Image (tube, grey):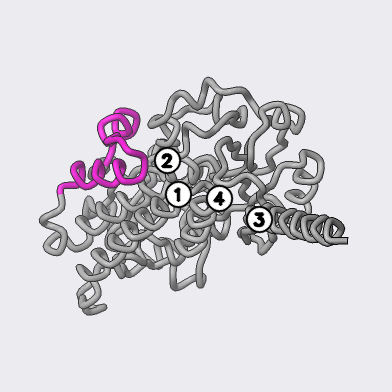
Amino acid sequence: MKFLKIFFLITVLSFLSGCDRLAQKDNSNLTVTDALGRKVVLKEKPVKKVVAIGPGALRLVCYMGLANSVVGVEDSEKEWDAISRPYILAYPQLKDLPGIGLGGPRPSPNLESIIALKPDVIFAAYLTKDQADAIQSKTNIPVILLSYGQFASFDMNEIFNSLRVIGEVSGRSDRANQLISYIQGIEEDLNNRTKDILPDKKPSVYVGALGMAGVHGIESTQAKYLPFTLINAKNVADEIKSSGSLMLDKEYLIKLNPDIIFLDEGGLALVKEDYKKNRAFYDKLRAFKDNEVYGQLPFNYYTTNIEIALIDTYFAGKVIYPERFSDIDISNKADEIFKEFLGKPMFNVITKSYPGFTRVVF
């Protein structure tokens, strides 16, 4: 009888121990909420191998210092010119990785290729919930959706949330917090330099030739354009629309007649071509008559190069409020920002392909 009691006690303890191990295993899973509110469970944490699909997903992964964890990239990342995407310039080895299907605004991932690479997680941007669920079901690999906010624009809060999620699943929350704090510091600096300028002391400004699902001329602009919003600039496009991209009628641009015009250098060639054909239109614009037209680096290619957008903002500040930004050397500031985001100074490389921050002469 004593033997049976001992045997029973051992059996119970073994069962409880087994239950405890099961609980620990369950507790080892990580559940995160992605950009569309999906609850995604990861069994491997921190993740060691990743792929990224959709506009801008790979960029955010690179911002987080995870380029060496990427095991495959979209064909477009391998084929497109890297100058428009500094994260590829910073990590050129990404172009040598296996392809995982077509990229672009409507990506078509090759699920067989992704399965063969055995990533721990798939980061994706601008897919629908149903698309993400379908990929996750077919590959049996967790799919985490990231976001920059409204397409062809960007929302810092959405980006911050995406960085935090990447940090959580990769064990790099410190890096996410570091980058977010850096960006918030820039936002604070820009606001502090300009917040007390009275409206009647501000020149009116406009940005044209913005990339939006392709290259456009001077008509392509944006209301609540973040580089202007960050420096409290008087954007004439804000009079037309509450926010977002728009194609502005040329005659209406004459009516608005901004004091200063910035042109995205991705579309600058189109503006120069149009200038030759429609000189009379441009002669009616105050900014062209007063030689107050400036080029800025294009930042919208496969969604937003956040680091370039911030660099453009400092340049806009120097042009619009020169006395408030007199201490800023744009090339030094650019390399500081590049190093924070991508670990390398790249201003001289980028400006080999674009005119850079300069007055545009027609």
Q: Position of residue 249 (x, y in %)?
A: 51, 59
Rounded to the nearest angstrom, the CA distance separating label 4 from label 3 is: 18 Å
**Which circle's residue, 2 or 1, is located before the other in the chain?**
2
- First in residue order: circle 3 vs circle 2: 3
Horizontal side, residue 311 vs residue 269: left or right: left
Quadrant where the image shows the C terminus: top left
Instruction: For label 4, count other residues whose C-alpha is less than 10 Å away and answer few (under 14), some (14-19) or many (20+).
Output: many
Magenta-drawn stretch contains 264: no
Residue drawn at x 76%, y 54% is: 14
The foreground one among 26 and 277 is 26
When the figure is inspected, residue 286 is found, relative to residue 351, above or below; the finding is below
Three-letter code for the amino acid on which mark 4 is drawn? Val
Tell me if mark 3 has few (under 14), some (14-19) or many (20+) residues whose alpha carbon lies within 10 angstroms of its own: few
Q: Nearer the viewer, residue 274 or 219?
A: 219
- Res 200 visible: yes
The Cα–Cα distance between marks 4 and 2, rounded to whole angstroms, is 13 Å
Q: Are marks 3 and 2 in contact (CB under 8 Å)?
A: no
Q: Circle 1 sits on which residue? A: 172
Camera-near label (2 vs 1) is: 1
Q: Residues within 10 Å of mark 2 (few under 14, many from 20)?
A: some
Label 1 near label 4: C-beta < 8 Å? no
Q: Is residue 249 visible?
A: no
Badge 3 amino acid: Gln
Residue 126, percent across and down? 64, 51
Q: Secondary structure at mark 4?
A: helix
| Pointer 3 residue | 24
- Image depth: mark 3 or mark 2 in front: 3
Which residue is under mark 2?
Answer: 65
